[in-house]
Image (spheres, rainbow, N blue to C red):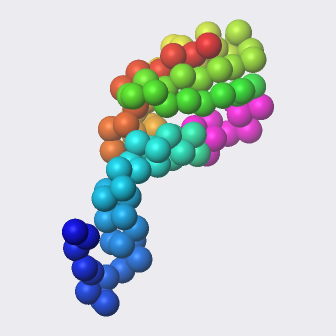
Amino acid sequence: MAKRLSNESSISEVLQQFIQQNKLGSGMDKIDVEQAWKSLMGNGVNSYTQEVILKGSTLYVKLTSAVLREELSYGKQKIIAMLNEELRKDVVKDIVLR
C-alpha cells in the first residue's frame, strides 16, 4: 500500500517518490541525458546530431558528419564526465558515436 505523505511535503519530494514507486527512473534518465547532450554540446554539434539514445549505461549518438564524429571520439571521457556532472549522477559509462 502506498505511503501517505504529510501535507507539508514539497512537490519535488512527491514527484521523486512517484518516480521511484512507479519505476520510471530509467525513462527519466533517457530524457535527461538527451536534454543534457543538447545543452552541453551547443548549436554546432546539435546541428549534426540525428539521434541521442541511452541503452543501459551506454549512450548512442548518431551524427551526420564523419569529421565531427572523429573529433568527438578523442574527448569521449570528458564528454561522459560532463554529462554525468550535469545529471548529478553516474548514468553514462560509455559513448558510441555512429
Q: Horizontally, is 80 left or right of 98 in the view?
A: left
Q: Where does residue 19 sit, x and y in percent of width and height?
A: 38, 58
Against 69, is 8 above or below? below
Against 28, is 78 above or below? above
Against 23, is 1 above or below? below
In the rendered image, residue 46 lying in the magenta stretch gets the answer: yes
Against 13, is 72 above or below? above
Q: What stretch is highlighted in magenta?
A: 36-47
- Name the residue furthest bottom: 7
Residue closest to the eye, 53 or 46: 53
Task: Find residue 64 and report its image quarter.
Answer: top right
In the picture, the quarter occupied by the N terminus is: bottom left
Task: Find residue 13 and report its image quarter.
Answer: bottom left
Q: Where does residue 53 sit, x and y in percent of width and height?
A: 56, 30
Residue closest to the eye, 98 or 11: 11
Q: Horizontally, is 47 left or right of 70 in the view?
A: right
In the picture, the quarter occupied by the C terminus is: top right
Tell me which residue sits at (70%, 10%) in the image. Answer: 67
Residue closest to the eye, 8 or 78: 8
Q: Where does residue 49 sit, x and y in percent of width and height?
A: 70, 27
Q: Is residue 47 visible?
A: yes
Q: Horizontally, is 21 left or right of 58 in the view?
A: left
Residue closest to the eye, 83 or 25: 25
Tell me which residue sits at (37%, 37%) in the image. Answer: 91
In the rendered image, residue 98 lying in the magenta stretch gets the answer: no
Tell me which residue sits at (43%, 24%) in the image. Answer: 58
Q: Where does residue 21 sit, x and y in percent of width and height?
A: 31, 59
